[in-house]
Amino acid sequence: MKRFISIALLLIIGLAAGVILDRYLPTNTDETAMEHAEKHTDPNYICPMHSEIVSNEQGSCPICGMDLVEIKTSESNIDDSDDPYPTVRVSSTMINNMGVRVALVERKTLIRQIETPGFIKQVRKESYTRYNSPAKGRVAKFHFKQGQWFEQGDSLIDIELDDLVLVQEKHLELLTKQTEQKKNKEEKPNEEPLTESTEVVTDAATTNKVVTEKKSAEPTIEKTRLLMKAAGMTEEQITDLEETKVTSPVITLYAKHAGEVEKLRVTVGEEVKANTLLFALGGLMRVTVLANAFQRDASWVKPGQDVDIILPHDSNKPLKGKVSSGAVSININSQNIGVELVFNAPHSVVKNGMYVVGNIYGQVQKDTLTLPREAIIYSRNEKRVIVALGKGRFKPVAVETGISNDNEVEILKGLEHGDTVVVSAQFLIDSESSLQASYRRMTAVE
Protein backbone atom coordinates (compact mmCIF):
# COMPACT_ATOMS: atom_id res chain seq x y z
CA MET A 1 0.00 0.00 0.00
CA LYS A 2 2.80 2.38 0.88
CA ARG A 3 4.51 1.46 -2.37
CA PHE A 4 1.36 2.36 -4.35
CA ILE A 5 1.05 5.74 -2.64
CA SER A 6 4.70 6.52 -3.37
CA ILE A 7 4.27 5.73 -7.06
CA ALA A 8 1.17 7.96 -7.28
CA LEU A 9 3.02 10.86 -5.64
CA LEU A 10 5.92 10.48 -8.04
CA LEU A 11 3.56 10.55 -11.01
CA ILE A 12 1.84 13.70 -9.76
CA ILE A 13 5.18 15.43 -9.14
CA GLY A 14 6.45 14.44 -12.57
CA LEU A 15 3.29 15.71 -14.31
CA ALA A 16 3.52 19.05 -12.51
CA ALA A 17 7.20 19.39 -13.38
CA GLY A 18 6.44 18.70 -17.04
CA VAL A 19 3.77 21.37 -17.18
CA ILE A 20 6.10 23.91 -15.57
CA LEU A 21 8.99 23.06 -17.86
CA ASP A 22 6.76 23.24 -20.96
CA ARG A 23 5.59 26.74 -20.03
CA TYR A 24 8.86 28.35 -18.99
CA LEU A 25 11.55 26.55 -20.94
CA PRO A 26 12.14 27.65 -24.60
CA THR A 27 10.84 25.26 -27.22
CA ASN A 28 11.81 24.78 -30.83
CA THR A 29 9.34 26.41 -33.28
CA ASP A 30 9.20 27.25 -36.96
CA GLU A 31 7.23 30.54 -36.36
CA THR A 32 8.60 33.55 -38.34
CA ALA A 33 9.12 37.04 -36.93
CA MET A 34 6.19 38.35 -39.02
CA GLU A 35 3.85 35.67 -37.67
CA HIS A 36 4.97 36.42 -34.15
CA ALA A 37 4.41 40.19 -34.66
CA GLU A 38 0.91 39.60 -35.99
CA LYS A 39 -0.04 37.87 -32.75
CA HIS A 40 0.80 41.03 -30.83
CA THR A 41 -0.88 43.57 -33.14
CA ASP A 42 -4.10 45.31 -32.15
CA PRO A 43 -7.17 43.20 -32.87
CA ASN A 44 -9.13 43.93 -36.05
CA TYR A 45 -12.57 42.67 -35.03
CA ILE A 46 -14.75 43.14 -31.96
CA CYS A 47 -18.13 42.03 -30.71
CA PRO A 48 -20.62 44.93 -30.90
CA MET A 49 -22.26 43.74 -27.64
CA HIS A 50 -19.22 42.58 -25.66
CA SER A 51 -16.20 44.86 -26.04
CA GLU A 52 -13.90 42.39 -24.26
CA ILE A 53 -14.30 39.88 -27.10
CA VAL A 54 -11.74 40.80 -29.79
CA SER A 55 -10.03 38.89 -32.57
CA ASN A 56 -7.63 39.32 -35.47
CA GLU A 57 -9.89 37.30 -37.74
CA GLN A 58 -13.54 37.30 -38.66
CA GLY A 59 -15.75 35.11 -36.54
CA SER A 60 -18.59 35.11 -34.03
CA CYS A 61 -18.85 36.06 -30.41
CA PRO A 62 -18.69 33.00 -28.09
CA ILE A 63 -21.06 34.71 -25.65
CA CYS A 64 -23.93 36.00 -27.82
CA GLY A 65 -23.13 34.45 -31.17
CA MET A 66 -23.15 37.78 -33.06
CA ASP A 67 -20.71 38.32 -35.93
CA LEU A 68 -17.61 40.27 -35.00
CA VAL A 69 -17.40 43.68 -36.72
CA GLU A 70 -14.32 45.44 -38.05
CA ILE A 71 -12.68 48.02 -35.82
CA LYS A 72 -12.36 51.33 -37.75
CA THR A 73 -9.05 53.03 -37.18
CA SER A 74 -8.56 56.80 -37.20
CA GLU A 75 -7.79 58.36 -40.58
CA SER A 76 -5.76 61.18 -39.09
CA ASN A 77 -2.63 61.30 -36.98
CA ILE A 78 -3.62 64.66 -35.53
CA ASP A 79 -4.32 64.64 -31.83
CA ASP A 80 -7.20 66.97 -31.08
CA SER A 81 -7.19 66.34 -27.36
CA ASP A 82 -6.11 69.94 -26.59
CA ASP A 83 -8.10 71.54 -29.40
CA PRO A 84 -11.23 73.38 -28.18
CA TYR A 85 -12.89 72.49 -31.49
CA PRO A 86 -11.85 68.94 -32.40
CA THR A 87 -12.41 67.44 -35.83
CA VAL A 88 -15.71 65.61 -36.28
CA ARG A 89 -16.05 62.60 -38.58
CA VAL A 90 -19.43 61.96 -40.15
CA SER A 91 -20.39 59.04 -42.37
CA SER A 92 -21.62 59.68 -45.89
CA THR A 93 -25.03 58.29 -44.96
CA MET A 94 -25.35 60.71 -42.05
CA ILE A 95 -24.19 63.60 -44.27
CA ASN A 96 -27.02 62.85 -46.69
CA ASN A 97 -29.55 62.45 -43.89
CA MET A 98 -28.62 65.81 -42.34
CA GLY A 99 -28.75 67.58 -45.70
CA VAL A 100 -25.25 69.02 -45.47
CA ARG A 101 -24.52 71.67 -48.12
CA VAL A 102 -21.19 73.42 -48.70
CA ALA A 103 -19.89 76.56 -50.41
CA LEU A 104 -16.47 77.87 -51.43
CA VAL A 105 -14.69 80.85 -49.92
CA GLU A 106 -14.17 83.22 -52.88
CA ARG A 107 -12.61 86.58 -53.66
CA LYS A 108 -14.99 89.16 -55.09
CA THR A 109 -16.21 92.75 -54.78
CA LEU A 110 -18.49 93.21 -51.77
CA ILE A 111 -20.75 96.21 -51.23
CA ARG A 112 -22.14 96.95 -47.79
CA GLN A 113 -25.93 97.25 -47.97
CA ILE A 114 -28.02 98.95 -45.29
CA GLU A 115 -31.79 98.49 -45.24
CA THR A 116 -33.68 101.59 -44.06
CA PRO A 117 -37.49 101.57 -43.88
CA GLY A 118 -39.22 104.94 -43.77
CA PHE A 119 -42.07 107.20 -44.90
CA ILE A 120 -42.44 109.81 -47.64
CA LYS A 121 -42.52 113.26 -46.05
CA GLN A 122 -42.52 115.53 -49.14
CA VAL A 123 -43.52 115.34 -52.82
CA ARG A 124 -42.90 118.24 -55.23
CA LYS A 125 -42.58 118.78 -58.99
CA GLU A 126 -39.10 118.13 -60.31
CA SER A 127 -38.92 118.70 -64.11
CA TYR A 128 -41.21 120.17 -66.76
CA THR A 129 -40.17 120.70 -70.39
CA ARG A 130 -42.03 122.14 -73.39
CA TYR A 131 -41.34 120.65 -76.84
CA ASN A 132 -41.67 122.92 -79.91
CA SER A 133 -41.31 122.16 -83.60
CA PRO A 134 -37.73 123.06 -84.68
CA ALA A 135 -38.85 124.08 -88.20
CA LYS A 136 -41.74 123.94 -90.66
CA GLY A 137 -43.01 120.45 -91.41
CA ARG A 138 -45.57 117.90 -90.32
CA VAL A 139 -46.04 115.36 -87.51
CA ALA A 140 -45.00 111.92 -88.78
CA LYS A 141 -45.36 109.57 -85.77
CA PHE A 142 -45.98 109.39 -82.01
CA HIS A 143 -43.83 107.02 -79.91
CA PHE A 144 -46.07 107.29 -76.85
CA LYS A 145 -49.50 106.52 -75.52
CA GLN A 146 -51.52 108.53 -73.08
CA GLY A 147 -50.14 108.09 -69.56
CA GLN A 148 -47.02 106.21 -70.69
CA TRP A 149 -43.90 106.84 -68.60
CA PHE A 150 -40.58 107.61 -70.29
CA GLU A 151 -37.00 107.59 -69.11
CA GLN A 152 -34.31 110.02 -70.24
CA GLY A 153 -33.28 109.32 -73.85
CA ASP A 154 -36.50 107.57 -74.95
CA SER A 155 -38.02 108.47 -78.35
CA LEU A 156 -41.10 110.71 -78.18
CA ILE A 157 -42.12 111.99 -81.64
CA ASP A 158 -41.04 111.97 -85.31
CA ILE A 159 -41.35 115.18 -87.36
CA GLU A 160 -40.84 115.46 -91.14
CA LEU A 161 -39.18 118.81 -91.94
CA ASP A 162 -39.55 120.45 -95.36
CA ASP A 163 -36.02 121.78 -95.90
CA LEU A 164 -33.98 119.26 -93.93
CA VAL A 165 -33.04 117.14 -96.95
CA LEU A 166 -31.72 120.21 -98.80
CA VAL A 167 -29.45 121.06 -95.88
CA GLN A 168 -28.22 117.46 -95.65
CA GLU A 169 -27.47 117.31 -99.39
CA LYS A 170 -25.57 120.59 -99.24
CA HIS A 171 -23.58 119.33 -96.28
CA LEU A 172 -22.59 116.17 -98.19
CA GLU A 173 -21.71 118.26 -101.25
CA LEU A 174 -19.39 120.47 -99.23
CA LEU A 175 -17.74 117.44 -97.66
CA THR A 176 -17.12 115.92 -101.10
CA LYS A 177 -15.66 119.19 -102.37
CA GLN A 178 -13.41 119.48 -99.34
CA THR A 179 -12.15 115.93 -99.86
CA GLU A 180 -11.34 116.60 -103.53
CA GLN A 181 -9.46 119.79 -102.66
CA LYS A 182 -7.31 117.96 -100.13
CA LYS A 183 -6.60 115.22 -102.66
CA ASN A 184 -5.56 117.70 -105.37
CA LYS A 185 -3.36 119.57 -102.92
CA GLU A 186 -1.56 116.35 -101.98
CA GLU A 187 -1.01 115.45 -105.66
CA LYS A 188 0.19 118.97 -106.71
CA PRO A 189 1.51 120.70 -103.59
CA ASN A 190 3.50 123.46 -105.46
CA GLU A 191 0.90 124.42 -108.07
CA GLU A 192 -0.79 127.78 -107.64
CA PRO A 193 -4.59 127.67 -107.64
CA LEU A 194 -6.21 129.04 -110.80
CA THR A 195 -8.26 132.20 -110.44
CA GLU A 196 -10.78 133.53 -112.91
CA SER A 197 -10.41 137.08 -114.21
CA THR A 198 -12.92 139.37 -112.66
CA GLU A 199 -13.89 142.97 -112.96
CA VAL A 200 -11.17 145.23 -111.60
CA VAL A 201 -12.25 147.34 -108.68
CA THR A 202 -9.96 150.21 -107.93
CA ASP A 203 -11.40 151.06 -104.53
CA ALA A 204 -9.74 148.84 -101.86
CA ALA A 205 -12.53 149.39 -99.32
CA THR A 206 -15.17 148.36 -101.83
CA THR A 207 -13.14 145.26 -102.69
CA ASN A 208 -12.95 144.10 -99.05
CA LYS A 209 -16.68 144.65 -98.56
CA VAL A 210 -17.61 142.58 -101.63
CA VAL A 211 -15.31 139.73 -100.60
CA THR A 212 -16.66 139.68 -97.01
CA GLU A 213 -20.31 139.63 -98.11
CA LYS A 214 -19.61 136.88 -100.61
CA LYS A 215 -17.90 134.69 -98.01
CA SER A 216 -20.64 135.19 -95.43
CA ALA A 217 -23.34 134.27 -97.93
CA GLU A 218 -21.62 131.08 -99.04
CA PRO A 219 -22.63 127.93 -97.09
CA THR A 220 -19.91 126.11 -95.19
CA ILE A 221 -19.64 122.75 -93.47
CA GLU A 222 -19.86 124.45 -90.09
CA LYS A 223 -23.03 126.31 -91.06
CA THR A 224 -24.81 123.23 -92.44
CA ARG A 225 -23.84 121.29 -89.31
CA LEU A 226 -25.33 124.01 -87.10
CA LEU A 227 -28.53 124.03 -89.18
CA MET A 228 -28.94 120.26 -88.81
CA LYS A 229 -28.40 120.48 -85.05
CA ALA A 230 -30.95 123.29 -84.83
CA ALA A 231 -33.40 121.04 -86.69
CA GLY A 232 -33.05 118.39 -84.00
CA MET A 233 -30.38 116.06 -85.38
CA THR A 234 -27.92 114.68 -82.85
CA GLU A 235 -24.15 114.45 -83.31
CA GLU A 236 -24.47 110.69 -83.81
CA GLN A 237 -27.07 111.17 -86.55
CA ILE A 238 -24.88 113.73 -88.36
CA THR A 239 -21.91 111.35 -88.21
CA ASP A 240 -24.09 108.54 -89.56
CA LEU A 241 -25.21 110.83 -92.43
CA GLU A 242 -21.59 111.62 -93.34
CA GLU A 243 -20.68 107.91 -93.37
CA THR A 244 -23.73 106.45 -95.16
CA LYS A 245 -24.56 109.45 -97.42
CA VAL A 246 -28.29 108.64 -96.89
CA THR A 247 -30.55 111.66 -96.34
CA SER A 248 -33.86 111.68 -94.45
CA PRO A 249 -36.39 114.47 -93.80
CA VAL A 250 -37.50 112.91 -90.48
CA ILE A 251 -36.04 113.89 -87.12
CA THR A 252 -36.85 112.35 -83.72
CA LEU A 253 -37.29 114.28 -80.49
CA TYR A 254 -36.09 112.49 -77.34
CA ALA A 255 -36.98 112.77 -73.66
CA LYS A 256 -34.62 115.15 -71.89
CA HIS A 257 -35.62 113.69 -68.53
CA ALA A 258 -38.00 111.11 -67.10
CA GLY A 259 -41.70 111.92 -67.28
CA GLU A 260 -44.92 111.50 -69.24
CA VAL A 261 -46.42 113.48 -72.11
CA GLU A 262 -48.83 116.21 -71.03
CA LYS A 263 -50.85 118.88 -72.89
CA LEU A 264 -50.62 117.25 -76.33
CA ARG A 265 -51.46 119.95 -78.93
CA VAL A 266 -50.97 118.15 -82.30
CA THR A 267 -52.05 115.02 -84.14
CA VAL A 268 -50.29 112.69 -86.58
CA GLY A 269 -50.19 114.25 -90.08
CA GLU A 270 -50.83 117.78 -88.89
CA GLU A 271 -48.82 120.60 -90.50
CA VAL A 272 -46.74 122.58 -88.01
CA LYS A 273 -44.76 125.79 -88.24
CA ALA A 274 -41.46 126.61 -86.60
CA ASN A 275 -41.69 126.96 -82.79
CA THR A 276 -45.19 125.43 -82.69
CA LEU A 277 -45.91 123.92 -79.24
CA LEU A 278 -46.22 120.14 -79.64
CA PHE A 279 -46.59 118.90 -76.03
CA ALA A 280 -45.01 119.09 -72.58
CA LEU A 281 -43.07 116.43 -70.69
CA GLY A 282 -43.88 116.44 -66.98
CA GLY A 283 -45.24 114.34 -64.14
CA LEU A 284 -41.83 113.75 -62.56
CA MET A 285 -41.86 114.33 -58.82
CA ARG A 286 -39.01 114.92 -56.38
CA VAL A 287 -39.67 112.73 -53.34
CA THR A 288 -38.05 113.08 -49.90
CA VAL A 289 -38.08 110.11 -47.50
CA LEU A 290 -37.30 110.09 -43.78
CA ALA A 291 -35.90 106.60 -43.20
CA ASN A 292 -34.70 104.81 -40.06
CA ALA A 293 -31.32 103.11 -39.60
CA PHE A 294 -29.62 101.44 -36.65
CA GLN A 295 -27.10 103.50 -34.70
CA ARG A 296 -24.36 101.01 -35.54
CA ASP A 297 -24.82 101.96 -39.21
CA ALA A 298 -24.55 105.72 -38.62
CA SER A 299 -20.86 105.89 -39.57
CA TRP A 300 -21.53 104.05 -42.84
CA VAL A 301 -24.30 106.37 -44.10
CA LYS A 302 -23.00 109.39 -46.03
CA PRO A 303 -24.64 111.95 -48.37
CA GLY A 304 -24.43 111.04 -52.05
CA GLN A 305 -24.57 107.26 -51.61
CA ASP A 306 -26.76 105.33 -54.04
CA VAL A 307 -30.11 104.03 -52.81
CA ASP A 308 -32.65 101.59 -54.23
CA ILE A 309 -36.16 102.70 -53.22
CA ILE A 310 -38.71 99.88 -53.04
CA LEU A 311 -42.37 100.88 -53.18
CA PRO A 312 -44.89 98.61 -51.42
CA HIS A 313 -47.07 98.11 -54.50
CA ASP A 314 -44.20 97.32 -56.91
CA SER A 315 -41.29 95.67 -55.11
CA ASN A 316 -39.85 94.18 -58.32
CA LYS A 317 -38.94 97.58 -59.81
CA PRO A 318 -36.78 99.60 -57.40
CA LEU A 319 -36.32 103.31 -58.11
CA LYS A 320 -32.86 104.91 -58.05
CA GLY A 321 -32.15 107.58 -55.47
CA LYS A 322 -29.48 109.18 -53.28
CA VAL A 323 -28.79 109.80 -49.61
CA SER A 324 -29.57 113.47 -49.02
CA SER A 325 -28.22 113.64 -45.46
CA GLY A 326 -27.35 111.14 -42.76
CA ALA A 327 -28.20 111.10 -39.04
CA VAL A 328 -30.60 114.04 -39.26
CA SER A 329 -32.46 112.94 -36.12
CA ILE A 330 -32.58 110.28 -33.43
CA ASN A 331 -35.57 108.50 -31.95
CA ILE A 332 -35.14 108.38 -28.15
CA ASN A 333 -37.59 105.48 -27.86
CA SER A 334 -36.17 103.12 -30.49
CA GLN A 335 -32.65 104.64 -30.55
CA ASN A 336 -32.74 104.68 -34.37
CA ILE A 337 -31.23 107.47 -36.45
CA GLY A 338 -33.15 109.33 -39.13
CA VAL A 339 -31.75 109.39 -42.69
CA GLU A 340 -33.08 111.57 -45.54
CA LEU A 341 -33.35 109.92 -48.96
CA VAL A 342 -34.38 111.58 -52.23
CA PHE A 343 -35.53 110.05 -55.52
CA ASN A 344 -37.59 110.86 -58.60
CA ALA A 345 -40.82 109.03 -59.39
CA PRO A 346 -44.03 109.42 -61.41
CA HIS A 347 -46.68 111.46 -59.64
CA SER A 348 -49.13 108.56 -59.91
CA VAL A 349 -47.12 106.12 -57.74
CA VAL A 350 -46.06 108.24 -54.74
CA LYS A 351 -48.11 109.95 -52.04
CA ASN A 352 -47.26 111.78 -48.84
CA GLY A 353 -46.96 109.42 -45.87
CA MET A 354 -46.42 106.31 -48.03
CA TYR A 355 -44.25 103.54 -46.52
CA VAL A 356 -41.11 102.70 -48.53
CA VAL A 357 -37.86 100.79 -48.00
CA GLY A 358 -34.47 102.17 -49.02
CA ASN A 359 -31.44 99.94 -49.57
CA ILE A 360 -28.33 102.10 -49.14
CA TYR A 361 -25.14 100.94 -50.86
CA GLY A 362 -22.24 102.04 -48.71
CA GLN A 363 -18.62 100.94 -48.47
CA VAL A 364 -17.15 98.93 -51.36
CA GLN A 365 -14.51 96.26 -50.72
CA LYS A 366 -12.73 94.96 -53.84
CA ASP A 367 -11.02 91.56 -54.12
CA THR A 368 -11.97 90.47 -50.61
CA LEU A 369 -12.68 87.02 -49.16
CA THR A 370 -16.41 86.34 -48.93
CA LEU A 371 -18.73 83.49 -48.01
CA PRO A 372 -22.51 83.07 -47.60
CA ARG A 373 -23.95 84.66 -44.46
CA GLU A 374 -25.75 81.47 -43.43
CA ALA A 375 -22.38 79.76 -42.92
CA ILE A 376 -21.59 81.93 -39.87
CA ILE A 377 -22.35 80.52 -36.41
CA TYR A 378 -22.80 83.37 -33.92
CA SER A 379 -21.94 82.65 -30.29
CA ARG A 380 -21.56 84.91 -27.29
CA ASN A 381 -17.84 85.57 -27.64
CA GLU A 382 -16.94 84.71 -31.23
CA LYS A 383 -18.04 83.70 -34.70
CA ARG A 384 -17.33 80.29 -36.21
CA VAL A 385 -17.72 78.37 -39.44
CA ILE A 386 -17.54 74.64 -40.14
CA VAL A 387 -14.77 73.82 -42.62
CA ALA A 388 -15.16 70.63 -44.68
CA LEU A 389 -11.77 68.86 -44.72
CA GLY A 390 -12.84 65.99 -46.96
CA LYS A 391 -13.54 62.28 -46.39
CA GLY A 392 -16.33 63.09 -43.97
CA ARG A 393 -14.18 65.26 -41.68
CA PHE A 394 -15.40 68.64 -40.42
CA LYS A 395 -13.73 71.16 -38.13
CA PRO A 396 -15.07 74.35 -36.49
CA VAL A 397 -12.87 77.39 -37.16
CA ALA A 398 -13.08 80.80 -35.48
CA VAL A 399 -13.27 83.72 -37.95
CA GLU A 400 -13.29 87.51 -37.95
CA THR A 401 -15.83 89.20 -40.22
CA GLY A 402 -16.04 92.62 -41.87
CA ILE A 403 -18.81 94.27 -43.88
CA SER A 404 -21.80 92.29 -45.13
CA ASN A 405 -24.90 92.52 -47.29
CA ASP A 406 -28.06 90.44 -47.53
CA ASN A 407 -26.28 87.36 -48.91
CA GLU A 408 -22.55 87.52 -48.19
CA VAL A 409 -20.10 88.52 -45.48
CA GLU A 410 -16.45 89.58 -45.63
CA ILE A 411 -13.86 87.33 -43.94
CA LEU A 412 -10.89 89.16 -42.39
CA LYS A 413 -9.19 86.24 -40.61
CA GLY A 414 -9.52 82.48 -40.21
CA LEU A 415 -10.09 81.26 -43.78
CA GLU A 416 -8.30 81.22 -47.11
CA HIS A 417 -9.41 81.40 -50.72
CA GLY A 418 -10.72 78.01 -51.88
CA ASP A 419 -11.70 76.68 -48.44
CA THR A 420 -14.96 74.75 -48.30
CA VAL A 421 -17.44 75.69 -45.58
CA VAL A 422 -20.75 74.16 -44.51
CA VAL A 423 -23.85 76.31 -45.09
CA SER A 424 -26.51 73.83 -43.96
CA ALA A 425 -26.66 71.58 -40.85
CA GLN A 426 -23.51 73.28 -39.51
CA PHE A 427 -25.11 73.71 -36.07
CA LEU A 428 -25.39 69.93 -35.62
CA ILE A 429 -21.73 69.43 -36.51
CA ASP A 430 -20.68 72.30 -34.23
CA SER A 431 -22.64 70.77 -31.34
CA GLU A 432 -20.97 67.40 -31.87
CA SER A 433 -17.53 69.03 -31.83
CA SER A 434 -18.36 70.87 -28.60
CA LEU A 435 -19.54 67.62 -26.97
CA GLN A 436 -16.33 65.85 -27.98
CA ALA A 437 -14.23 68.69 -26.57
CA SER A 438 -16.16 68.57 -23.27
CA TYR A 439 -15.77 64.78 -23.05
CA ARG A 440 -12.02 64.99 -23.60
CA ARG A 441 -11.66 67.64 -20.91
CA MET A 442 -13.59 65.43 -18.47
CA THR A 443 -11.42 62.43 -19.37
CA ALA A 444 -8.25 64.44 -18.81
CA VAL A 445 -9.46 65.44 -15.32
CA GLU A 446 -10.17 61.83 -14.39
Image (cartoon, helix red, strand yellow):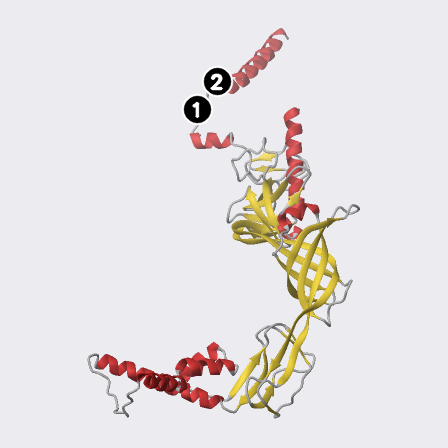
Q: Residues within 10 Å of mark 1 (few under 14, many from 20)?
A: few
Q: Residues within 10 Å of mark 2 (few under 14, many from 20)?
A: few
Spot occupied by residue 386 in the image (x, y as percentages of width and height) = 60, 44
The kind of residue tagged 2 is: Leu
Who is closer to the viewer here, 363 or 109?
Answer: 363
Spot occupied by residue 39 in the image (x, y as percentages of width and height) = 51, 31
Q: CA distance from mark 2 to mark 1?
A: 10 Å
Q: Quadrant of the C terminus?
A: top right
Q: Determine whether, in the image, residue 425 is placed left or right of residue 110.
A: right
Who is closer to the viewer here, 251 or 87?
Answer: 251
Q: Is residue 263 above or below residue 272?
A: above
> Regarding mark 1 in the picture, which secondary structure is present there?
loop
Q: Is residue 101 above or below residue 432?
A: below
The kind of residue tagged 1 is: Asn
Who is closer to the viewer here, 396 or 366?
Answer: 366
Seen at 67% across and 43% down, the residue is 378
Spot occupied by residue 158 in the image (x, y as percentages of width and height) = 57, 85
Q: Is residue 62 above or below residue 100?
A: above
Q: Is residue 382 visible?
A: yes
Q: Is residue 240 visible?
A: no
Spot occupied by residue 267 in the image (x, y as percentages of width and height) = 65, 89
Who is closer to the viewer here, 37 or 86?
Answer: 86
Q: Are marks 2 and 1 in contact (CB under 8 Å)?
A: no
> Regarding mark 2 in the picture, which secondary structure is present there?
loop
Q: Is residue 327 above or below residue 139?
A: above
Per the image, the residue denoted by label 2 is 25
Residue positioned most to the left: 190
Identify the mark at residue 28; answer none if there is no mark: 1
Q: Quadrant of the N terminus?
A: top right
